[in-house]
Image (tube, coloured by chain):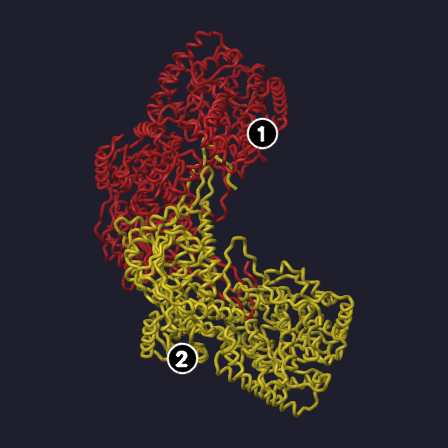
Chain colours: A red, B yellow
Amino acid sequence: MTAVPLRIYDTGKDSGKKSPMSAFLPPDTTLESAIKSKGEQLFALMDQQPPPALFSKKGAYARLMEWSMKDPVFKTQLFRFVDVLPSLNSSAEIVRHLQEYLGDKAVELNPALKAGLAASSFAPALVATPVKAQIVDMASQFVAGETGEDLLKQIKRNTKLGLATTIDLLGETVLNDAEADVFLQRNLEILDSVSKFYAKEPTPSFSDLGPKGPLPRLNLSVKISALTPDVHPADPENSIAALKERFRPILRRAAAVGALINFDMESYKLKDLTLQLFKSIFEEPEFRQQPAIGIAIQAYLRDCESDLRDLVAWARRHNRPLSVRLVKGAYWDYETIIAQQRDWPVPVWQKKPESDANYEKLSLFLLENIDIVTPNFASHNVRSCAHVIAQAERLGIDPRAYEFQALYGMADELKLSLLQMGHRVREYCAIGELLPGMAYLVRRLLENTSNEGFLRIKNMGEATKDQLLGNPVNAIAAAPEPLARKPHAAGAFVNAANTDYTQAANRDKQRAALTACTAQLGKKWPLIINGKKITDRAYIPSVNPAKPSQIIGSWARATVADAESAVAASVAAFPKWRSTPIDDRARILERAADLMESRRLELNSLLILEAGKPWIEADGDISEAIDFCRFYAVEMRKLAKPVVTQSVPGERCVQTWTPRGVGVAIAPWNFPLAILTGLVVAPLVAGNCVIMKPAEQTSVIGAVLMDLLVESGVPAGVLHFVPGFGEDVGAHLVGHPQVDFVAFTGSRAVGCKIWETAGKTQPGQQTLKKVVCEMGGKNALVIDNDADLDEAIPAALYSAFGFSGQKCSALSRLIVLDEVYDHFIERFVSACGSYPIGDPAQPGTILGPVIDADAQKKILGIIEQGKKEAKLAFQGTAPAEGYFVPATVFVNVKPEHSIAREEIFGPVVAVLRAKNLDEAFALVNGTDYALTGGLFSRSPKALERAQNEMLVGNLYLNRACTGAIVERHPFGGFKMSGGGTKAGGKGYLENFLFPRSVAENVMRRGFTPPEEA
Amino acid sequence: MTAVPLRIYDTGKDSGKKSPMSAFLPPDTTLESAIKSKGEQLFALMDQQPPPALFSKKGAYARLMEWSMKDPVFKTQLFRFVDVLPSLNSSAEIVRHLQEYLGDKAVELNPALKAGLAASSFAPALVATPVKAQIVDMASQFVAGETGEDLLKQIKRNTKLGLATTIDLLGETVLNDAEADVFLQRNLEILDSVSKFYAKEPTPSFSDLGPKGPLPRLNLSVKISALTPDVHPADPENSIAALKERFRPILRRAAAVGALINFDMESYKLKDLTLQLFKSIFEEPEFRQQPAIGIAIQAYLRDCESDLRDLVAWARRHNRPLSVRLVKGAYWDYETIIAQQRDWPVPVWQKKPESDANYEKLSLFLLENIDIVTPNFASHNVRSCAHVIAQAERLGIDPRAYEFQALYGMADELKLSLLQMGHRVREYCAIGELLPGMAYLVRRLLENTSNEGFLRIKNMGEATKDQLLGNPVNAIAAAPEPLARKPHAAGAFVNAANTDYTQAANRDKQRAALTACTAQLGKKWPLIINGKKITDRAYIPSVNPAKPSQIIGSWARATVADAESAVAASVAAFPKWRSTPIDDRARILERAADLMESRRLELNSLLILEAGKPWIEADGDISEAIDFCRFYAVEMRKLAKPVVTQSVPGERCVQTWTPRGVGVAIAPWNFPLAILTGLVVAPLVAGNCVIMKPAEQTSVIGAVLMDLLVESGVPAGVLHFVPGFGEDVGAHLVGHPQVDFVAFTGSRAVGCKIWETAGKTQPGQQTLKKVVCEMGGKNALVIDNDADLDEAIPAALYSAFGFSGQKCSALSRLIVLDEVYDHFIERFVSACGSYPIGDPAQPGTILGPVIDADAQKKILGIIEQGKKEAKLAFQGTAPAEGYFVPATVFVNVKPEHSIAREEIFGPVVAVLRAKNLDEAFALVNGTDYALTGGLFSRSPKALERAQNEMLVGNLYLNRACTGAIVERHPFGGFKMSGGGTKAGGKGYLENFLFPRSVAENVMRRGFTPPEEA
């Protein structure tokens, strides 16, 4: 065993401290020369093969690839066109998309292509047919065939060449059980048909013979995401149970026919789940011995070494030989982007040579464990292969004890050269329909055109053979980090990261926090006015909506007299708070954010229990609250600096801001921490005094926030905790002549009432009252004919049913274009069944209860009304205890139906049909609301039109319409959705400030000072 | 005569086209060597004199000058301290100011000074007394004496040395007749006393003897601004009449005692007036022969050559010999800054060598006309002097036929050297009290420390003698333009320039436009709704408030049904207008601006006649209207570009804007074009439809604006002209459910009513109604103890009485600090008498009528009420015809008096006394309003405090509190002054827009496009 220390999960933060190379194999001169010699031998053999067609510079495909490598914009547009092609049902549509993608001004086309594009409108079929054929032809270069027949032909061909085969059935994420059933069936059929074929063709190929005799010739690779719709990484227990149900038939069949089943690896979020599934299913007595098994390990992951060591230890413990397919990994861009979007540590090495170096390190580890592991080295990189061969020779390992793998349609010259050198080689053959397999094609195209891909660099002659055979460790220092996000500037706002519940440790901590929180429920929470606790009031209990018998706590109900004292104290405290340095005020918010972060799991627990929020929703709520504190602190610091309005000699002209005075924050229960925090801290940091009135249903969370803000340093008098009922305390405060502004989020009825009350200037009132008013929505998602349904359906499900649809941003109307309507409904409705409803205290729950009995009754009533108006297409089941409402889908809804017009605030979706985008956009805009909306489309024109024509406050394109992130997605709508303010946006604080202009004549006696720097 | 072409007034715009050097004397080798030889001779002689004390590096003064030259911040602070010193009445105050100025972090002090400053609080007198003495001592280096006695001593000294003397009595702008009387008396006394002195000392000095015998020994320089408060450059006729009254006694006395009277030149705006006065008074029979006369000409002015030629032609025509004192000019910074502030062509050469070159050109011209002119070459520049000598020799002129002049206390070595070379030299002796003469001192300090001043360059050894003697023409190309304003960026907003009514041509054009406008009065103006003129309505006449019998025109009164059609047409037109490209909308505004500019004098006339606006006010109104159009066009183009909210991989996140819908613009009569234009074009360019309701009193201007906007390209349906009465049409529109916003400027009562009506959401209403509401003010100007009253009083007068106080920004309360109260009141009240009231059609009028009989009655009623509450300190007279109200000042006003609380909107000022700044700021903030406010102070601390503590929308420091300029001074207040919007400010358009966030997932198949540039 090598003595190199185990490198565990690296957050990327300390990479400056340790030398990253210490984690990899230290270069060794003897070994290097062996590798070089093996590599040169391989190169020499490869040069004798016909040149790879993909890089031949002949043929349409090669030319397209060449342009793609030269022009990144063309590459993007071409690949996007390839991606959308399968969903286009007519020549006209193909031509339109072609024009939209490649007619873009930024795309440089060669004259022939340009002319073709220009002509294509006149004779769409003339262009569309060959274009489609060409793309299909492109796909066929990477897909071994559409049918079992095709596959058998390829197996024959491979056998003849001496290659072994592993089979991959094209198909990724399934959305419902029907789709999963189909996929399972296809796997079983392949096992049957191929085993029958092998039975008839008894001669194994060269590569099918291991050191101890024949190996399983039938080798099937399976992706877990294609097996069941019930894969939820944050809920591994239930996911694994569901996956096992699907896997067992395959394993039984494999055992029966003597096949090897290989677990493919997909995205990082599924990795732990896949490993856990692998180990636990093969510990089941039935599968302890057979079938033969294998699993893929991705060397680009920073933490794969520990996974691999763990896996080998498991195999030894259970005496279970296995294959390990060592790959670099195919989702590098995706993993990098997603982690950066979430402010999570990036799980993949950021530099290409780091992955290569890690590959070598793990190659050695596998070879060192060859007694229990059959290593499958899946790489097109000659250096990686040469390294394996050199290490194996050094260790005296029989070359037949391990194998190389390469993809169908790629690196044929490498496969044949390795064979010639006496190595076993297995070809990874993807099988399936060409058009639906475009995702696979795009991945291959990316691989072939990547700036850092070995095949491109070699075949385009971008490096010498010596360079290509160099030790990757030596290339790390100078290597680029192609997708690295720009570092945050000093003092810039940075979003808080959500908890990654796919990590078991985080789930354990959350469970412990829930237990601790539950043990402490039932406290009494007093009013806090002018720094004093007021306890002698009536107390109102707050209950867990999932278990109404559980009392979360009780809160003191404020009286009108309490509201009066809070106003009086605020008026008195205002002048001092106004003149408190902005930096001091900002630091209080930052302390609050730090406190929230340190108590995140505790606060999460309270949100789960009092608001019925699923884990991930509660966690997002906390993150948003933290973001509000930090963002408004940063923004207020910016506003503190006077801005020069016009640069003019002899006069200093600036604009500054001054706070409005005393305000009331009236918050809803659905984001009980985030929105309340935002409504309170924005005016506070701006220098105003605030009277905080949380929603009745979540006043305990309000009380906890109050304590936290006081602990952070908000002075007495500046902030008051006055929970109560909107009708009395709220209304009194809104109309109070000494209240200068109201920050409100809630229902349309209450919002309009507040707007009206605040409009009336009372005797003695000092300012025109400002209302920041955010109300409801009737949010629509439009599904275009060319939408990617694999993405649209999960996004629609989550937008509609996440937190039981109780978000102002939640999806309420699905507007589906005519052509795709039936297909969409079929897939969407059958996917609804898999949506996990239940107690939000369980990590897998996405659909919890609604907030209270009133809400439950109201929503169930709306559903009944809906049944009279439209067609009920789906209704789930719901637990008996608690305020649950099942997920519900209505189809054939007409725009005049009340379920298409009224806000529901529950897990109910109305599906409307639209002839075309004109009609769809008219439907979107045809309600009283304008909050969120979205479009799934792969037409650049349609996406552009949506930006001009979908009149909503927050427009989401090709993604879910919920989950706005502070600063990134300033949130708020207009029409009856709100006054047009943007919470978490750049101008938000200005709502709580008055602008002031200052003009100072700086000329005296004709003399003006030198201009300020 | 030289053949060099006359260079007339240069706007600076075409300086790139012609070579600026063509205007100056072409260098001539023979002459240059003569100049060099004369210059070297002068330098040699100067070197034999004792070194100039000012630059000796010895003594406190010299050290301060040296620091000033090194550290521009120190220089600013020191000179400001010098400037304020005379107004400081105690050691404590001196020390406080010293600390505030020199304790500034940006000032680098030497350790001794720093220690002194630190210690000064403990023993103020110990520091203050010597500091004051030192400054007084500094002043005494430049002022020949405080009394007539001192002057006579200096004359004796000069006579002995061979120098002649010209006397200048310190004192500039006078604010009232009493001050003017004092100054006149001092001049007469000087003439008496000095003539008596000369009578007793019969021997003239060398320099008093001209080529034909003795010259007038008594030579007195007079500044016209010190002679009368009634100097109004835009009204030369009346100003000259007033000046002549003051001048005649001086001239008579001068004639009697045989003195020469020299007219000094001051700022550019007084130049034409001074020349005109000079010529016209000396054409009066009484003064055709005597006294002897002279006038100064400033070579730094681009247009002085034509003035000089004109003057010489005049002298020849009238056979009136005269002296011309050729100076470079002492107000270069001031002229440059003021012109740039006003976007006027800068009247002075921007490069120092241009002024020097022009000086030489004019020197030659003067020498060529020596038969009628006695040139006085006033320069400390050796090259300029040498040039004169060389040219005179070339022309064979007797050196006694011209003279050199130099200032007392400066360039003594030059004076003596010139004498030694046989030239006549006259010393310019300023006489007067040292402390009030600080303005004069500061000018001298600037001169001595200027980067480009000859004395500094020579005496600090910053150039060789050869360089100093070089022809300035050769230095022009490389010379800096020290105060040049940064050029406007392409597409940037540029303010429109007001008409310069000090130019006779502009006055003539305005008079003609008024005549033309008057001839066309009386038209009938229909409604315009949906592009159609509606004529069959009742017509309401609009009259000239200065002559109520004159009907300006009649306007059709809209009905509620008309309002309904306008709304319906707007709703229909909105979708198309919303999607009209922003650039098209912006260009319509720019066309409107161009049209307004091309019709400026015509529109001015209408404003003068219908609104009773004085010329300069009407002209400013047009400029502001033009600015609104251009500024909002530029700002809207900026808003058209989506702004990235957060840069995140895989997602494109931007914010964009969308218009609100249909709005009503309800405008006031006091800025009948500017405010109406602003309220209409801002929402229009943002993409909204607008119903325009001008004020009843100025609906003809509204009709003209409507026509102009239609001509500019606003489509039918998008804008409607619906004049009417607020109570019916206005109220109906504000409450209309299809009206989305109201843009209002007007009274508090109407504003609050609109706020309330708009607050109520009507059935069927689509949006929460937005109100942009600007109301009144009760604006205060605070006069600190150390204020510069010479600046504060004219600013207060103009702020209070300009346009009869009918601006929301007008000064209504003067809050004067205790110590300075009596002195201020005395000067202020006596200055009120000079304020010109009358028909605004006359160019000199500043105080015109109020808008109508109701306003007149209301204001006169308030004045009567004021007389009961406080003490009437001043009440002017008013014409009998028309709605005039005399300027009125109340003193001893208490904050509880209604004249200290209620908005008056007329020429009435309440003066309140405050113990200190705390009390003053409390008074400022103690009303219901928060619009404009100001402070006159020379305490850096007080100015900083005002910025934090004077809670008004527009704060003005050391300047008038009216006259906000678009972009430079975003305008609007809070409390009962408005909703906190800023007309003409960066964020204004956002009031008429809704923000929209767009988040587009740009990752497909794990692939994201290259980041947009």
Q: Secondary structure at mark 1?
A: helix
- Mark 2 and mark 1: Cα distance apart in space: 94 Å
Q: Please provide percent x and percent y for residue B997.
A: 40, 44
Q: Please provide percent x and percent y for residue A5.
A: 52, 30
Depth order, front residue of A529/B858: B858
| Disc 2 and disc 1 in contact, CB within 8 angstroms | no
Q: Quick one: label 1, few (<14), some, or many (20+) residues within 10 Å? A: many
Look at 77% across and 66% down and name the residue there: B29
Residue at mark 2:
B876
Question: Seen in the image, is B739 located left or right of residue A385?
Answer: left
Query: What is the three-letter code of the residue carrying label 2?
Result: Gly
Tag in front: 2 or 1: 2
Query: What is the three-letter code of the residue carrying label 1?
Result: Pro
- Residue lying farthest to the bottom in this orientation: B200
Instruction: Please determine whether, in this image, residue B149 is positioned above or below residue A805.
Output: below
Residue at mark 1:
A472
Depth order, front residue of A175/B168: B168
Can you tell which quarter of the image residue A228 is in? top left
Look at 62% across and 86% down and name the residue there: B290
